[in-house]
Image: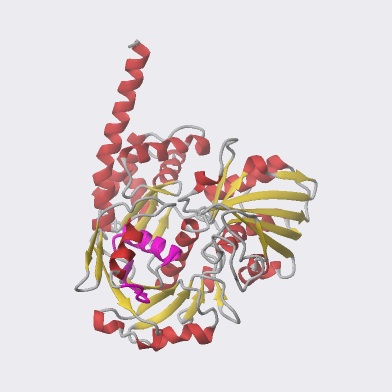
Amino acid sequence: MTQQSVVAQQEWSGREELAEAMIPLIGRLYRKNNVVTSVYGRKLINQSAIDIIKAHRVVRRIDGEELDLNDTKAILDAIETLNVGSVAVDLGRVNKKFKESGSADLNAFLTEELGEKVGQAGATDAEPQDVVLYGFGRIGRLLARILVERGGYGLRLRAIVVRKGSDDDIVKRASLLRRDSVHGRFEGSITVDEENSTILANGTLIKVIYSNDPTTVDYTAHGIDNAIVVDNTGRWRDEAGLSQHLQAKGVSRVLLTAPGKGDLKNIVHGINDSWITADDKIVTAASCTTNAITPVLKALNDKFGVIHGHVETVHSFTNDQNLIDNFHKGERRGRSAALNMVITETGAAKAVAKALPEFEGKLTGNAIRVPTPDVSMAILNLNLENETTKEELNAYLRETSLTSSLHKQIDYIDSPEVVSTDFVGSRRAGIVDGLATIVTGKNAVVYVWYDNEFGYSCQVVRVIESMAGTHPAAVPALKAEAVTV
């Protein structure tokens, strides 16, 4: 082995050791203090040493150099010493702000930055909110994974409600939660108690309730009260249908994981979640495509102005389609999803205006269902008010994904080798593919990848947090206005 190889191995081992030392510290801060840590939006909770190192390496594409694990370890140590409570801390952004401040006293800097959170270890801004999943399909199971991952902090998954399909129904439900052909194995352990009809997932006890009628469920009989019911069945889309949940004992509010009909508020988190009021008993989380494109459209409209545009969605097939040709009440959807590209309509373009009224009448849209199980792409063909270039537009969207209040919704990538499977498990609503961008004067074509299952589910959980008021304050705070480059 050459001297260079020895040095490289020693350097890597040192970084692994540092990352391994950070894992229990990150865990203690989360479980004891409710401090959520991340690096430029990439969460560090329940991550391996390699994942932590990778999160630090990504920063070189942001700040021009890799984030030093020694720096973040020092910040974590200081946060623990200061007994900080209930806050979401982005270590990458905090470290950058500290370096730019010129201060030599990290504790003093953090004391000022964290303000009233110092000395509040164990305190929370709101009581944990009971959550019930009505339906346990693709989105329901992913919501369960995300909620279980959070360990009951802020949001507590208490029950799922399904129609009984067989004598061993609960075993099959647990198996589908444990193994997923697209998203892989569940991270942790799952235990089934058939006698008591419960699933224990990483310490979260989930009651499985069987019912065909939402009005007849008595949640209080299971110790559940003031719950938010997340209806992911798609069976009811209007206020009349969804109001049935409010007739059940123990339910206070309802969230639909689909576009709502009538006057229901369609919420895209990061865009119009501030519209949610305590009086809103029923809200909807719009669609996966609406969530993917609305943040990007807002950013582009803020900077360049959008006169009109067309959205073409290349969307993975869904359970609504047939695997092989058979009768279907919808047009074309009866043809085999696994063998065909299927043109179908999408309401996503019109739905954008429900979250961004300034887009009323500005967008048209269509969709092509393709033979992939997950991850879709939206192609935004836009006529802008102001001329720009590919370089300027991409630089703006990249900066927006990093430093604006939309950083949880928009990601940016410019790799020449990425394909759809690379975005399975993305927690962002949409990922701009910078190399695919086309700009000619006032015309721009922007390609946005999105995990139409997991990325959307993350957006749904953010809406639940907004309804419950349980999301911890972010440090450092990010600007909501359009960024400048």
Question: Residue 446 location in percent, x, y?
Answer: 68, 49
Residue closer to the observer: 362 or 311: 311
Instruction: Farthest residue to the right: give it.
Output: 441
Question: What residue sits 36% from the left and 40% below the top?
Answer: 52
- Identify whether 243 is placed above or below 143: below
**Occupied quadrant, residue 7:** top left
Q: How many marks?
A: 0
The answer to whether 53 appears left or right of 284 in the picture is: left
- Identify whether 19 is placed above or below 13: below
The answer to whether 316 appears left or right of 21 in the picture is: right
Residue closer to the observer: 485 or 234: 234
Look at the image and tell me in which quarter the N terminus lies. Answer: top left
Extent of the magenta region: 137-166
Question: Residue 126 location in percent, x, y?
Answer: 33, 70
Residue closer to the observer: 125 or 127: 127
- Identify whether 416 is placed above or below 289: above
Asked whether the viewer can see residue 116, the reply is: no
**Occupied quadrant, residue 177:** bottom left
User: Magenta stretch containing residue 143, yes or no?
Assistant: yes
Question: Residue 111 location in percent, x, y?
Answer: 33, 51
Asked whether the viewer can see residue 365, the reply is: yes
Question: Residue 476 location in percent, x, y?
Answer: 44, 52
Question: What residue sits 34% from the left and 80% below the top?
Answer: 226
Look at the image and tell me in which quarter the C terminus lies. Answer: top right
**Occupied quadrant, residue 138:** bottom left
- Identify whether 84 is placed above or below 165: above
Q: How is the image coloured?
A: secondary structure
User: Magenta stretch containing residue 161, yes or no?
Assistant: yes
